[in-house]
Structure formats: structure tokens, C-alpha cells
Image (spheres, helix red, strand yellow):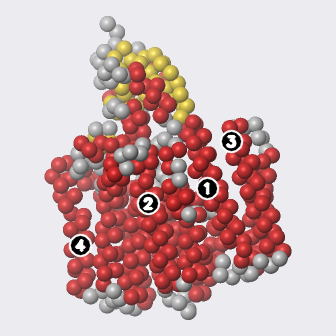
Amino acid sequence: MCALLFLCNLGARDFWAPDEGDFAEIVTELKDNHIVPHLNGTPYGEKPPLFYYITYLSKNALFFFKDEVSMRFSTAVFAIVGIVFFLITIHRFFGINIATLSSFILMSTPLYYWQARYLQVDMIFSVFISCSLLSFFWFYNTDKKRYFFIFVLLMAFGFMTKGPLSVILILPIIILFLIIERNYRVISLRDFFFGIAIFIVVILPWYFAVYYMERFPYLYENIIRQNLVRFFDAWSHKRPIYYYFTTLPLDYFPWSVFIPFGIYMGVKRIKEDRKTGFFILWLLWMFVFFSLSSGKISKYMLPVLPPIAILTSLAFLKPEHRYNSLMFLGLSILFFSSGAFLCLFKTNIYPEFTVERIIIGTVLITLSVLICIFLKLNRKSYVFPVIICAIVTIFTISNISIYKKLNAYKSPRVLADMVKPLIRDGTPWVYYGSMRGVYVYYIGKHAIHIDEHNTVELKKLVNMEKFYILSRKRDHKELSDTLVNVKTIFEKKIGETPMVFLLYEKDI
């Protein structure tokens, strides 16, 4: 089922801005420099290289597929591995019921599903983090040393994927758990230092190599600015401390309505099974940490989903509870309303999606009716599987049809195909604005990049005989005022962003 959700029709859509195109271009340029990642020919220091290496191997191993499939494949496989290891772990320590429920919940969570099909670093990073913590959980409960070293190795891989954040997310959970358990000697000094040695051996070679090639500024960007500075004073995605309380309910829907009861059941369960406390600590630490960070994006919640899935599954161990009955009824009303809306309301908008709207609307109405029937017949344990079936059906329809049609609105490839013939004669082109690697990737030629509103750098180009400029339409006046001799070649809207392609020719 994971393969159906995460792998089916991966190439139905092109790479979308902003991140997918950046990563696709970085991986493409990796062939020219295997040590230092580059974007548009410039060293790219935001993250260590492991994600790029994994994607590069996937791209070359699956060379017979187009890049949209071969590059996304590794992310989808990691998502499946994360589910499988999670299922095995929970089955071993909590039993088949909780393992099955929590794995289905995790798999069908919108955020997990979407990130499994998206070319971004976050899914692979999340799997390293989650599997590292689960490996420590194996070590603590079995006293088998190999799991401790697997824990350290995966934490190091997480570090090589997204930097020190790996250690910051993992170690406080381990330390707090051992303090609460009053078990300080579970790790021998010998194993502790051997673990440190493993960690150092994994991370230091690349950092030494990149320091040798790029010196301190690259390391500052990679370690200090992208972690410490970004935590306290992010330059993008600044959101209030309560931000994740507003995004998680949708990213985790429909299971989010069962989180309060699941947490209650988890806290209550600690008395009889202290292992549950590990996952409560996992949830609390990561949620608090990400909430305190000044920069927030909903995808950052990915490594928080496994403990939430376990706690949520506890709610379904008591399907007859009054809380669950109320939530089932509320979901039934919501599903029916949503289904009716899709089938009947403003069907003339985006007519190409009419069939999908009717199918998904019918699925939601059917789901609503079935929930009501099961509530009436007091068969509340049947509600969970029918919700899963409905989610899988909707996600599969999205994989097969919706993303392909949505691509016509979101893909920058059409614009890139319009640009390529114009620069075929060697005329340089400028990208004016925050760098979007997706245009470089699909155009197939490096751009002269100038940040938005940096008119000083823009004026330095006026002595060139001729060049093209790609920019957001909102910057058209600024470009015209600065360069004077520009004319519009075409305009094109990508998603919600109007773009403009201009030509500058120097007066003779």
C-alpha cells in the first residue's frame, strides 16, 4: 500500500518551485564537483551533501527513467523504509494492534504522503531522525549494543543531511528519558566513546574536504547561519509561536481530531507501560523546539509524526468511548458537507477536474453514510478501516489524475521551453529575484543571478550588448527604470506568480 501511495505515477508532474527545482539542479551539477554542492554554478552551503548524494545515486541507477521519477524515487523509498521500521518496532514492543493502527495513520497522514512524493530533504532527514530514535529505543529495551551503534550512525547520517539539527532533535530526548528513568549507566563509557568515534568518522571527512576547498565562509553558512542564526532570527518564514497549532490539524487530518484523547490515553498508559513515555517526550521536545524557532514551515513537523501516530492509535483502542463517538459523528458531517460541496458547488470552475470532483465527492459522501451506519449499529471499530480506504482512494486518484492536470498550472517547464530557443545563440540570461533553480534546470543553462531590488548589480550589466531577463512581473517597472532599454518578450503565470521575460539591448 505504501508503494501505491508513494511510488505510483511519480513522474506525472514536473519539478515545482521553489525547492524541487533547486534540488534537481544541485544534483545535476554534482557531476562537476562531488564535494561541494553547487546551484547555478555557485557553491551552495545551506545543507550538508548526503541528501544530494542519495538522490544522485538514485538518478544514475534509474537513468532509464526521467529525472522527475529517478530523483524522487529515493525519497519515496526512504518514506517506505521509515514506515516499515516503525511498524516492526511498534509491533515488537507494543503489539500488533497498536503497530497496525499507528502505521496506517502515519502512512495516510497528508504531510507524510505529500513529502514522500516531493523532492525535498525533509523526508530523508526525518527518516534518519525517527529511525535513530527507534534504534535507541531497541537498544534501551533489549540491551543489545548493535542498536546503540545503529542509533549513532543514523544520527550522524542525519547530521550529514541537515546539519547539527540532527543532534539537537535527538540527544535532549535521550537525556531526558534516561533522567526520568533514572538509568544513567545503560550506556557504558567504552560504548559511549566508540559511538562518538563513529559519529566523528562519518561527519568529519566531508567537513575537512569542504573547508579545504571553500574555507570558513562556507562552513559559517552551513553550520552557524543555517542553524543558530536561523533559529533565533530567521530571514524567511517567520511565524508566531502558535503556528503549528494552526497547521498540524490540516497536515494530520483526519487523525488530528483524535490527538487530545490519544495523548490522554498515552499519559494514562505510562503507569502500566513506561515505554510510552519515550514517545511522549519525543513529541513534546520536538514540538516545543520547532515552535520556539523563529522560522517555521509545516513540513518541519515530519519527525514529530511517528510519536503522534502512536499516541493517536491509542484512541482507537477504545472505539466505543464517547469522545470517539463525537469525533466520528463530527467527521461524518464534515465528510458529507465536503462531498456535497465538491459535487454541487461551482462545478464550472476548473472544468477539467469535474470527473475527479465527482469521484472524490462520492467517496466522501459514501464514507459519511458508512460512519453513520456503523455508529447506529454500534460497530465503531469498523470506522477506522473505512476512513483508511477512503484516504487511500483519494490519494490514488490524486496520483493518477489530479497532479498531472494541476501540473499545467504549476509547472515552470512551459516557460523554460519558451526561453530555450531565444538563448540558443549564446545570448546570456539574467534571473532577477530570489534564486529559483527550477528555471536553470529546465532551461539547461546557468543564469546571471541578481537578487531582487539589487539595482546596483543590475546597473553593472548595462555595458553588455544584449541579454535576456527573467523576473517576477512585480519587478518589471524597477527593471525598466534601471536598464531603460528593455522590451517585453512575453509574460507567463506560473501558479500564482506572474513572470515576465525581457530583452535588453544596448544603444549603439
Tell me: residue 348, above or below residue 402: above
Q: Amino acid at mark 2?
A: Val
Residues at circles 1 and 4 in contact by the CB criterion of under 8 Å: no
Residue bearing mark 3: 353
Q: What residue occupies the far right of the structure in this picture?
A: 376
Q: Residue at x 58, y 37 (%)?
A: 409
Label 3: few (<14), some (14–19) or many (≥20) C-alpha neighbours in 10 Å: some
Give the label on residue 77, or none: 2
**Mark 4 and mark 2: Cα distance apart in space:** 25 Å
Q: Amino acid at mark 3?
A: Phe
Where residue 96 appears, x then y in whole percent? Answer: 56, 81
**Mark 2 and mark 3: Cα distance apart in space:** 29 Å
Q: Amino acid at mark 4?
A: Ile
Residue bearing mark 4: 198
Q: Secondary structure at mark 4?
A: helix
Which one is in front in this view, the residue at disc 4 or the one at disc 3?
3
First-in-chain label (1 vs 4): 4
Q: Secondary structure at mark 2?
A: helix
> 72 or 432: which is nearer to us?
72
First-in-chain label (2 vs 1): 2
Q: Is residue 172 visible?
A: no
Give the label on residue 395, or none: 1
